[in-house]
Image (cartoon, helix red, strand yellow):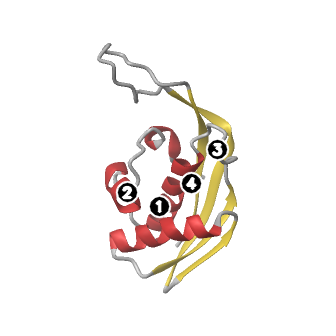
Amino acid sequence: MKVRVSAPARLHLGDIDPFGLGRFGYAPIAAIDQPRAVVDAEDARELTVEGTEEREVALYARRTLAGFGLDGASVKVLSVAPRHAGFGSTTQLALTVGRAVTAAHGLKPDSITLLKALKRTSTGGVHTCLLYT
């Protein structure tokens, strides 16, 4: 099955310490319509990747395939958010690739299972990330 997954970038609004405990790491975020990560994927016998960020996309695709016991996928990256600009681009790209690869195989794992397969610890983009187009 061929699918397209699109995820909005997000803005990090800074760390806060909501309970006054001297611990930070709570960061309000806001999804924005542009830029977006857009990834096409199709089930396949082996992994092929084309488009931007090929090495990183291949890493996340391999992790997804291994995590769900899948053989392969054809993955094409159509767009990504600018890197290191506060858009959550790495998490959004990882989740978009993982969602596209699993959807191409007819799977729709919950977000936590997908994050574990991707070996990602950032959860800030989970709820703003995944919109199928």
In this rendering, would 83 be left or right of 57? Answer: right
Upstream in the sequence, badge 3 or badge 1? Answer: 3
Residue receiving disc 4: 93
* Distance (Cα) linking label 2 and label 1: 7 Å
The answer to the question of whether label 2 and label 1 lie on touching residues, with beta carbons closer than 8 A, is yes
Does residue 126 appear in this view?
yes
Secondary structure, mark 3, is loop
The answer to the question of whether label 2 and label 3 lie on touching residues, with beta carbons closer than 8 A, is no
Residue receiving disc 1: 98
Outermost front residue:
22
The answer to the question of whether label 4 and label 2 lie on touching residues, with beta carbons closer than 8 A, is no
Q: Nearer the viewer, residue 29 or 40?
A: 29
Crowding at dot 4, Cα within 10 Å, few <14 / some 14-19 / many 20+, comes out as many
Q: Position of residue 116 (x, y in %)?
A: 33, 57
Crowding at dot 3, Cα within 10 Å, few <14 / some 14-19 / many 20+, comes out as few
Q: Residue at image x 56%, y 42%?
A: 88
Q: Position of residue 15 (x, y in %)?
A: 47, 25
Q: Amino acid at mark 4?
A: Leu
* Distance (Cα) linking label 3 and label 4: 13 Å
Quarter of the figure with residue 93: bottom right
Residue receiving disc 3: 84
Crowding at dot 2, Cα within 10 Å, few <14 / some 14-19 / many 20+, comes out as many
* Distance (Cα) linking label 2 and label 3: 23 Å
Secondary structure, mark 4, is helix
Outermost bottom residue:
45
Residue receiving disc 2: 114
In this rendering, would 20 be left or right of 96? Answer: left
Q: Amino acid at mark 3?
A: His
Upstream in the sequence, badge 1 or badge 4? Answer: 4
Secondary structure, mark 2, is helix
* Distance (Cα) linking label 1 and label 4: 8 Å
Secondary structure, mark 1, is helix
